Image (tube, rainbow, N blue to C red):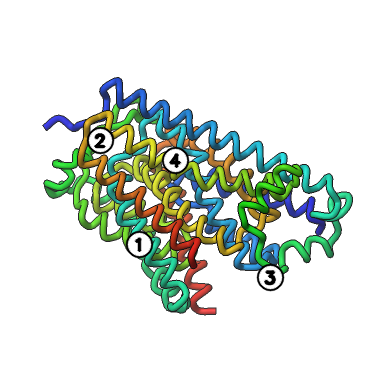
Amino acid sequence: MTPLFFTLLVAAISLSAGVLGSLVGVGGGIIVVPALSLLLGVDIRHAIAASIISVIATSSGAASAYVRERITNIRLAMLLEIATAAGALTGAFLAAYISGRWLFILFGVILSYTSWSMLQKKKTAATVLPPDPMADSLRLHGSYFDRALGQQVTYRVARTKLGLAVSYVAGTVSGLLGIGGGVLKVPVMNLAMGIPIKVCSATSNFMIGVTAATSAAVYFMRGDVQPFVAAPVAVGVLLGAKLGSRLLGRLPNHVIRIAFVAVLLLSATQMLWKGLR
Amino acid sequence: MKPVTPSDSKALQVEIVISELLRWGVYGSLLLLVVGTVVSYIHPETYGAGGGSGADLHRLITEGATFPRTLSWLGHGLLQLQGQAIIVAGLLLLIATPVIRVLVSIIAFALEKDRAFVVITTVVFLLLMISFALGKAG
């Protein structure tokens, strides 16, 4: 394989990662890292750094459409981002001391369970959310126009404190394992906080970019960001995310949910594989 | 209680400004990344002559050497229009976009006179700055 072919292949793989990532609110890392390291033999440090870049690209590529269509709940995103950013700081510096092995197994199991819960969601959709004074006083509740339904959807936010706790863990994990925290944040927003799946995707999309920016800066200063690898990843993911963000508003909720469950299962498999190998 | 949406026109304008800013940030980095890659292929010493060979690829994806990352290297490289420096500038712009978005949000919440969220967003921004500072030191 020549460098030129590598560049084009990586850009194509990244394009699909960007479409999927922007739709479900997770970074393209779960596709980009194995494609680069297992399939193409890229040094794992460069692969992880490129995947962090892909998370930012997913977020920024999709963001302008989501802000314009007002699907992103920016207030909620900012609040949860405090916890996530603090977690990411913790994770980045714990990484030197903690072996990833058991963490991979632990999160592999957690993600498997989460994907099962996300599939069960339909049955419990009618449950009444508990009142949340914190969400009331911070005015976290919101509404957006759902193009697929053709109507304005109004929603309330519950269990903000649980959301903060999970966001902290999600941030730590993203710093430790080099994955975006989206796989943890989307389910907690959707299942526990009662937020529509599209808002979860778009809001998670906003947050993963901000969190990844801090990690990316750290990787960058360390010299792990190899331009030859990172450039085609960033270009492919940016274009893919732009495509994906145009699709999100138009696709029905259950399609987004199924795509997310597929991403969760893929993610869980990868983590268990890394931990058990 | 009626759910609160940031629907007053000032907030809407700020959101549109944020959206535009992001769009141009993204286009800017896309342009730099593509141009940088093309330039890198034109100069055979970076990626190898005529699209490179298998040996070039092996060197590029496995070498353990860290990538030079000083600002003076970047400035020097950009002046000489080196492909790698142009790519790095594109990557830095990409990394900066979410941070700029947080910064603009602080202003947006201040315009909405939403004290709680000015504080929350400022804390987010400070945490980001701390990460940068620690990352640089570490």
Where disc 2 sits, the SS reads strand
Image coordinates of residue A44 in percent, x first then y, are: 61, 68
Which residue is rendered at x = 67% and y = 53% of the image?
Answer: B73
Tell me the CA gap for discs 1 and 4. 21 Å
Q: Is residue A187 left or right of residue B131?
A: left
Neighbour class for label 2 at 10 Å: few (<14), some, many (≥20)?
A: many
Q: Position of residue A39 (x, y in %)?
A: 68, 63
**Which residue lies under the disc numbered 2?**
A142
Q: Are marks 3 and 1 in contact (CB under 8 Å)?
A: no
Up/down of A168 relative to B22, above or below = below
Report how far apart the C-alphas of labels 4 and 3 lie in the structure: 32 Å
Mark 3: few/some/many CA within 10 Å (<14, 14-19, 20+)? few
**From mark 1 to mark 2, how far is it between C-alphas?**
26 Å
Q: Chain of mark 4?
A: B
**Residue B64, labelled with which disc?**
3
Residue A119 image position (x, y, % from top left): 36, 54
Q: Is residue A54 above or below residue A39?
A: above
Residue A227 vs B15, above or below: the answer is below
Same chain, marks 3 and 1?
Answer: no
Q: Which mark is residue B7?
A: none
Please give the name of the residue rendered at 58% of the width and 45% of the height, measured from the top-left corner.
A237
Estimate the spatial distance between the alpha carbons at disc 2 and disc 4, rounded to whole Å. 24 Å
User: What amino acid is at disc 4?
Assistant: Ile
Disc number placed over residue B100 in the picture, else none: 4
Label 1 sits on a secondary structure element that is helix
Q: Are marks 1 and 4 on the same chain?
A: no
x then y, percent, for residue A61: 52, 39
Q: For the residue marked with disc 3, what is the amino acid?
A: Gly
Output the chain of dot 2: A
